[in-house]
Image (cartoon, rainbow, N blue to C red):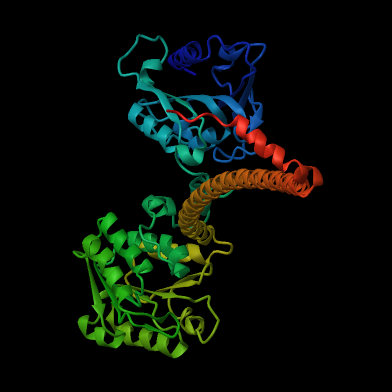
Amino acid sequence: MHQSSFDKMSKFRETYLAGREREPLLILDLGSMDVNGSYRPLFVSDSWQYKGIDLAEGRNVDIVLPNPYDWTGIESTSVDVVVSGQAFEHIEYFWLTMLEIARVLKPGGLCCIIAPSGGFEHRYPVDCWRFYSDGFSALGRFAGLEVLDAYTQKENLGYKDDSDTWKDSVIICRKPARPLEQAGLSQFNRDILIEAYKVTVADAGQPLKVDFNPIEHPRSFFEEPQKLSDIASWHEHMPFAFLVMDILKPRVFVELGVHKGDSYLAFCQAVKNFGIDAKCHGVDTWKGEEHAGFYDESVYNQLTAYHDPLYGNISTLLKMTFDEALAKFADKSIDLLHIDGLHSYQAVKHDFEAWLPKMSDSGVILFHDTNVRERDFGVWRLWYEIKDKYPSMEFKHGHGLGVLAVGRSLPQDFVDMLAAGKVDNSALLHLMYLLGSRNSLKYTVASRDRELVSFREKSTALENRLKAEEEKARNKDKEIASFREKSNMLESQLKASEEKIKAGEERTRNKDREIASLREKSKALENRLTDILHSKSWQVTVPLRAVGGLFTRKPAKR
């Protein structure tokens, strides 16, 4: 270890870990073997646990890794700090190692990596890379880490050892609190990179006896299809569409059987995004057939509405039968042909034989649905008849895809790829399966999202309807309450009226009784008067009352 590296790591410790000596930190040192020095003295604290990790046993090594890309035994989100110095230049696929660092760090965990930007070759056992601050920053973002600092020593600082020769670069990162899937590269994509590594590197880190290296075509791994319809049968093979376009770089591509365009649009996307000088031709009647089902003009209209603005300058849609389209192409003019029309044995055999003369010396034919044996699908039968007559390989996941090299002047990388696909338990096939599964998962998630949106819209509509009904119910309740109030008031008025009537009736009865009593008294008086008038005393005293009347009369006025 040169002195400038130790000093830079010491600066990291002072800047980012000072004041944390009482925290129980787990600190890993990648490439820790003490050959001519160690960082261990910088991380001595009663509360800290420092562990050195390397690829072989030795001084200052606590954990031996099987390889730099598989930190078996170190749990995810379990480490507080990862440091490394003078290791990354010796790691062939350092970006995979960076993903492991991101995996094991806790949210908020830190890493500090030091590697040379210059200096002479020093193989240990290999010397692959030099780093600048921009490259280190890109590496941190690639792994989904927050870059806190990145710098490169550009001037000689007067070290007495060879420190100034190396002019170290330094990156300091922090793992964000949000999950890695949201912060940067997803765990699924990380697994895909590991599989790509396994295609060419065995578990022991030694090259396999296969010449094809998919890592040389990284854009095909991370190119994601822009259009996924509900016709999902090609979703799992789209990664190979990107890979085959990247390797072959065909001048002319033809697809027989476009339908909604999932596969065709993926090929067009590769041509456009990869900058391939190619012309694409999609042939279909857009009426459907017994296997795909029959459909109306809307399928074609929807396809052209999407296709024309994006790919109209590189692609032509030929609305005709496959046989009618033959005249559009000269013999030996097509470099890549995809047959995906009617899937009966007779139909696909006819398409193969009719279009074979159109294939160029670097021609490749793709057969979709080699793994489908339902109804009268017969692609599998034709595939078994012809696959051994030409260099070939088959992807058996999904609906199956056969790759047939009918040309004699194919790119060597494509020939090597076919050989890699023939290896037992081929990691290449597994890699394509993983990449394809990503598309299927993406479509499934998107479908579920659409269903969720639809459910939420329906739920919102139902909630609004419920609110409206509740409002109606409240209005009805108000009407009922008002009616009850009026009813109660009327009942009160009625009751008061009834009481008044009863009181009036009682008064009437009292009057009637009073009248009856008076009538009885009057009758009694009449009877008494009658008795008096008919009595002897009244009759005897008549003269006396007459004389008495004379004396009681008043004199007349004069």
Q: Residue at x 69, y 38 (%)?
A: 545
Q: Give the answer, above or below, for where 40 lies relative to 217.
A: above
Q: Give the answer, above or below, for where 162 lies relative to 173.
A: above
Outermost residue on the right side: it is: 536
Q: Residue at x 24, y 60 (%)?
A: 310
Q: Residue at x 66, y 36 (%)?
A: 547
Outermost residue on the bottom side: it is: 346
- Location of residue 239 by image quarter: bottom left
Position in image of residue 509 (x %, y %): 70, 47
Q: Residue at x 44, y 39 (%)?
A: 184
Q: Left or right: where does residue 321 sit relative to residue 68? A: left
Say which quadrant the C terminus sits in: top left
Front one among 37 and 330: 330
Q: For residue 424, say whether it is visible.
A: yes
Front one among 70 and 478: 478
Q: Give the answer, above or below, for where 164 lies relative to 495.
A: above
Q: Give the answer, above or below, for where 8 lies relative to 439.
A: above
Position in image of residue 172 (x %, y %): 44, 23
Position in image of residue 55 (x %, y %): 59, 34
Q: Left or right: where does residue 401 sit relative to residue 56? A: left
- Location of residue 411 by image quarter: bottom left
Position in image of residue 385 (x %, y %): 49, 84
Q: For residue 277, say whether it is visible.
A: no
Counting every numbered tag in the picture gives 0
Front one among 437 and 157: 437
